[in-house]
Image: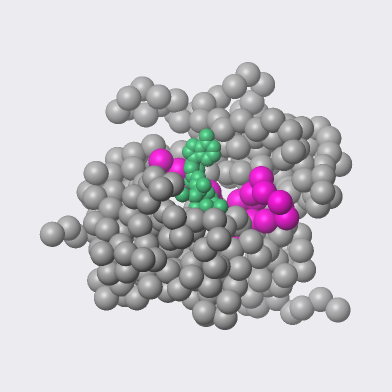
Amino acid sequence: AKAKPAANSANTAATAAKTTVKLSHPDKLLWPDEKISKQALLDHYALVWPRMKQFVVDRPLSLVRAPDGVGGQRFFQKHASPGMHAKIEKTKNPTDGEEILFVRDFDGIAALVQLGVVEIHIWGCTIDKLEQPDQIVFDLDPDEGVDVKAVREAALDIRGKLDELSLPNFVKTSGGKGFHVVVPLKPSADWAEVKGFAHDFARALEQGAPDRYTATLSKKARTGKIFVDYLRNGSGATTVAPYSSRAKKGATVSMPVTWAEIEAGLPPNAFPIGDKTTLKRLSEADPWVDFFKKGKVLKRG
Ligand code: ATP
Ligand code: MN
Ligand code: MN
């Protein structure tokens, strides 16, 4: 029997997004080991679309394409290429003249799937305010061999410190080895200010527990520790979008979750596409529903 969807559920046929974009080879397996086809990926996005759209619409995108599936060649793509569907829109960054790709609606997402996009990455800003981020991302990157429990504790540690600063905070799985703690902002501070804040925050964490955390990118500094990756917050930097699939073993997604789920021992690679655990999660209340409503202006000093 099917679980009864919660009131604000995205998990009903009635609310699943629809598209006129046609998939050329819907049965093509993008994740052959997990038997996830292009159509299955599109079905995933149709299901999560009501929750996902606020994080991807009208936002610069970078795409990981795997036209022959995740075992084949992969391309990280920021600009248009020939034959792209018109629903993948283009604009110019007035600051540097660089072309930016974005989507306006679910047809745009379907066009990405058609293209063999297996990961959707976003800038932390919208196309109308390219110089003023609307989020801060702390990407927790454990060194090989660091226990996943320690990564959860790091996320909870960050949450506590953000609470002390009265900064709203949300958490998602990366779908890989870590978690992303994300702070919504009212766009105001520029990239330099936001990255400066994130760097100071990461350094303070390292100073508080130098045996557990490092704020330095180098592999050497990371030995046995968790790199608090503040570099997601620079101009042009990207992070995998909430609800995006990952080109990783297990065909996982980057899933917005609750802090209670982290406390209860959730692993970062939970939630494969179409899995019953994923469908169950999506039938429960949306933990990121009021993300942007909670955004604050970042004050420095
Ligand atoms: P994990 O939990 O396994 O670390 P993750 O999504 O946080 O998963 P990272 O390796 O920490 O992965 O981050 C990679 C980041 O680098 C992503 O945010 C991505 O947007 C960015 N990026 C920039 N250039 C590339 C590229 N060429 N290929 C893949 N990612 C890239
Ligand atoms: Mn990471
Ligand atoms: Mn990282």
The x, y position of residue 267, in whole percent, is 61, 68
Give the dominant element type of the magenta stretch: helix, strand or loop.
loop
Looking at the image, residue 218 sits to the left or right of residue 278; the answer is left
Q: Establish if 165 lies above or below 71.
A: below
Q: Residue at x 86, y 41 (%)?
A: 27
Q: Residue at x 77, y 42 (%)?
A: 30
Q: Establish if 2 lies above or below 62.
A: below
Q: Establish if 16 lies above or below 191.
A: below
Q: Nearer the viewer, residue 222 or 22?
A: 222
The x, y position of residue 120, in whole percent, is 58, 44
Asked if the stretch drawn in magenta spans residue 244, the answer is yes
Q: Residue at x 43, y 60 (%)?
A: 225
Instruction: Specify the quadrant of the image occupied by residue 123.
Output: top left
Asked if the stretch drawn in magenta spans residue 202, the answer is no
Quadrant for the N terminus, please.
Answer: bottom right
Q: Nearer the viewer, residue 75 or 214?
A: 214
The magenta stretch is 237-255
On the question of residue 285 being in view, the answer is no
The x, y position of residue 139, in whole percent, is 44, 56
